[in-house]
Image: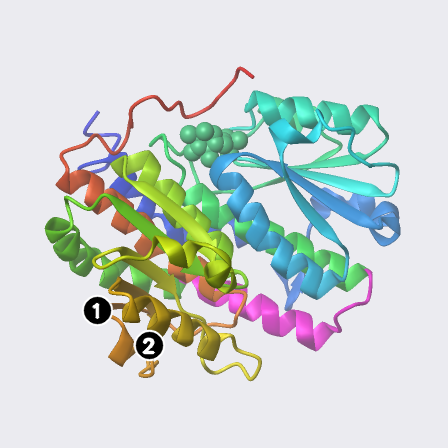
């Protein structure tokens, strides 16, 4: 009903506008004096110093949030992380054991594919942690421990605010692991914690500035047939998420690629007029992939592509090569992706709206897939 939407025209629009507080609320009570505080994981502590591997199980948008988490957890806690689509996991005789921590990520906590994968993991000796947005759902009940995301109820079928909350929870897990395993010292942890705490305000800024611009160019783009998304490092799963959202909401063929993979195949798809959305890493980091992504943009532009760049405020190098630039505030390399995803969510919603589609209930999809 209109009242449930709190004055918003659609749940999708409401939930995208709630991305900042989805992050903020997931952090509440979990940071004390610059350190991560996760009492939920206490019963795990002996194990968390002992594990030699993490396997993350998820489907759809939750799987892309998990992939972003992999970049951070490996970098901070120095533990190998594999992200597996739940429905592939238990049908392929996976290698897991007592030193494997299996983390499931699910907004609903009811996705049958993920539930079956968790049950399989448990039966084969792994310890299981559920990252879930729904109190008391089946997957958290079947797991050894649970770390709830606090995105609030998500009604629109395609997931948006749960995505940023899931990444936040995975980052908290990564920082907790780095602390107890001694791979980051206290000042390093506290600097990263500060980045996390700064995210909601920066996300607010993105929500406020990206809406109208994107609605504008979504209107002249209504007839687009296919869109490619490029990103690198933690921007790569963001490209995958941007493409998924466009398929789900606007029924437009879309694919996400790691920008480095372009020359190994996808560049063959570039022809005049092809729309490509590029997530551009910050140029400030000394190890930045910025120059490589700029040269990717030059290559596709030379072949006639239309480029929309999502780039940091103040990045002027991108200007000569992009048709449109959407700006995001400055953040560290692992935090930019959370900012870059918001305009992509808005883009999918606006394109769907421009096509007159129901953004809350796209055809053929279910919010929670409780069958295999
Ligand atoms: C369905 C929804 C997606 C969601 C996926 C995983 O396919 O349409 O938006 O990402 O399930 O859902 P979960 O509740 O496990 O996060």
Within-10-Å neighbours for mark 2: few <14, some 14–19, many 20+: few
Residue 259 x %, y %: 47, 62
Q: Is residue 339 left or right of residue 274?
A: right
Helix, strand or loop status at disc 1: loop
Q: Are marks 2 and 1 in contact (CB under 8 Å)?
A: no
Q: Is residue 3 left or right of residue 37?
A: left
Q: Is residue 26 left or right of residue 54?
A: left
- Residue at 82% x, 34% y is 126
Q: Is residue 272 left or right of residue 110?
A: left
> Which residue position holds label 1?
323
Looking at the rendering, the stretch of residues picked out in magenta corresponds to: 181-200
- Residue at 73% x, 28% y is 92
Q: Is residue 97 above or below residue 167?
A: above
Magenta stretch holds residue 59: no
- Residue at 34% x, 21% y is 364
- On the question of residue 235 being in view, the answer is no
What secondary structure prevails in the magenta region? Answer: helix
Within-10-Å neighbours for mark 1: few <14, some 14–19, many 20+: few
- Residue at 71% x, 29% y is 143
Residue 87 x %, y %: 61, 27
Helix, strand or loop status at disc 2: loop
Q: Which mark is residue 78?
A: none
Which quadrant does the N terminus fall into?
top left
Q: Tell me how many marks there are.
A: 2
> Which residue position holds label 2?
313
Q: Residue furthest front?
A: 268
């Amino acid at each position: 009903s209109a009242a449930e939407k709190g004055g918003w025209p659609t749940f999708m629009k409401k939930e995208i506008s709630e991305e900042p507080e989805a992050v903020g609320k997931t952090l509440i009570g979990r940071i004390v004096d610059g350190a991560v505080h996760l009492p939920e994981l206490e019963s795990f502590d002996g194990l968390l110093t002992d594990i030699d591997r993490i396997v993350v199980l998820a489907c759809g948008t939750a799987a892309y949030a998990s992939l972003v988490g992999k970049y951070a957890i490996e970098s901070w806690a120095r533990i190998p992380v594999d992200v597996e689509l739940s429905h592939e996991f238990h049908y392929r005789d996976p290698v897991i054991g007592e030193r494997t921590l299996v983390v499931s990520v699910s907004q609903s906590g009811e996705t049958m594919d993920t539930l079956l994968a968790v049950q399989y993991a448990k039966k084969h000796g792994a310890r299981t942690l559920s990252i879930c947005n729904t109190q008391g759902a089946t997957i958290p009940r079947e797991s050894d421990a649970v770390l709830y995301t606090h995105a609030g109820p998500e009604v629109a079928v395609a997931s948006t605010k749960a995505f940023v909350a899931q990444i936040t929870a995975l980052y908290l897990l990564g920082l907790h692991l780095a602390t107890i395993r001694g791979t980051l010292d206290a000042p390093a942890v506290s600097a990263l914690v500060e980045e996390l705490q700064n995210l909601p305000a920066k996300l607010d800024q993105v929500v406020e500035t990206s809406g109208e611009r994107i609605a504008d160019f979504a209107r002249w783009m209504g007839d687009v047939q296919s869109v490619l998304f490029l990103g690198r490092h933690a921007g790569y799963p963001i490209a995958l998420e941007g493409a998924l959202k466009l398929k789900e909401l606007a029924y437009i063929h879309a694919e996400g690629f790691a920008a480095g993979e372009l020359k190994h195949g996808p560049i063959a798809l570039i022809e005049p007029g092809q729309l490509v959305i590029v997530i551009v890493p910050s140029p400030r980091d000394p190890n930045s992939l910025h120059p490589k992504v700029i040269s990717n943009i030059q290559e596709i532009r030379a072949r006639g592509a239309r480029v929309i760049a999502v780039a940091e405020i103040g990045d002027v190098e991108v200007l000569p090569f992009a048709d449109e630039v959407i700006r995001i505030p400055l953040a560290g390399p692992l935090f930019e992706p959370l900012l870059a995803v918001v305009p992509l969510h808005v883009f999918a919603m606006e394109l769907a709206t421009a096509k007159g589609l129901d953004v809350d209930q796209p055809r053929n999809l279910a919010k929670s897939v409780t069958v295999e």
